[in-house]
Amino acid sequence: MVLRHAQYATEVGAYGVVCPAGLLPVLRGKFPTLKTVAVGIRDDLTQTIDHYYPQTIEYAAKQGGHLFVIGRPITEDQDPVKAAQKYHKRVLAALS
């Protein structure tokens, strides 16, 4: 279904799509100019009862994701600011 939505998005001239982080390689391969907002970013991939195809932030960054939604791993942390800073550093490290 994600590929069908991405195809439609390109046909109507959309800038990008929201997609599961685990499907980034497929989307980036088939639609290389389409920007992606990756959801389902998790550290513990065994605790993913609410997302299909979750992945780590490193994986999503290396697979060409443009923007990342990292909701609960940050908002539910005891120190959300520190958690957000940690994710930022991890993205930079993955891309260097």
Image (tube, grey):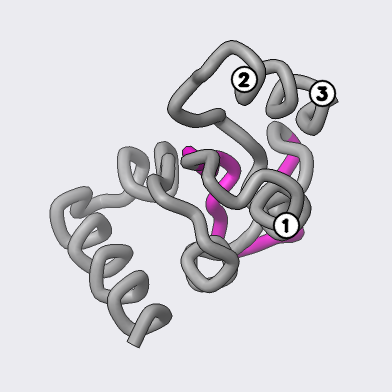
**In the image, residue 49 above or below residue 2:** below
- The quarter of the picture where the N terminus appears is top right
Residue 47 forms part of the magenta stretch: yes
Instruction: Give the quadrant of residue 46.
Output: bottom right
Residue 74 forms part of the magenta stretch: no
Label 2: how many Cα within 10 Å (few below 14, some 14–19, many 20+): some
Q: Which mark is residue 29?
A: 1
What residue sits 47% from the left and 41% below the top? 35
Amino acid type, residue under disc 1 in the picture: Gly
Side of 3 where 81 appears, left or right: left
Q: Are marks 3 and 2 in contact (CB under 8 Å)?
A: no
Rendering coords of residue 71 (x, y %): 41, 38
Of all residues shown, which one is farthest toward the top? 12
Choose the circle earlier in sequence order: 1 or 2: 2
Instruction: Give the quadrant of residue 4.
Output: top right
* Residue that numbered label 3 is attached to: 4
Q: Which SS type dominates the magenta stretch?
A: loop
**CA–CA distance in space, label 3 to label 2:** 9 Å
Side of 2 where 93 appears, left or right: left
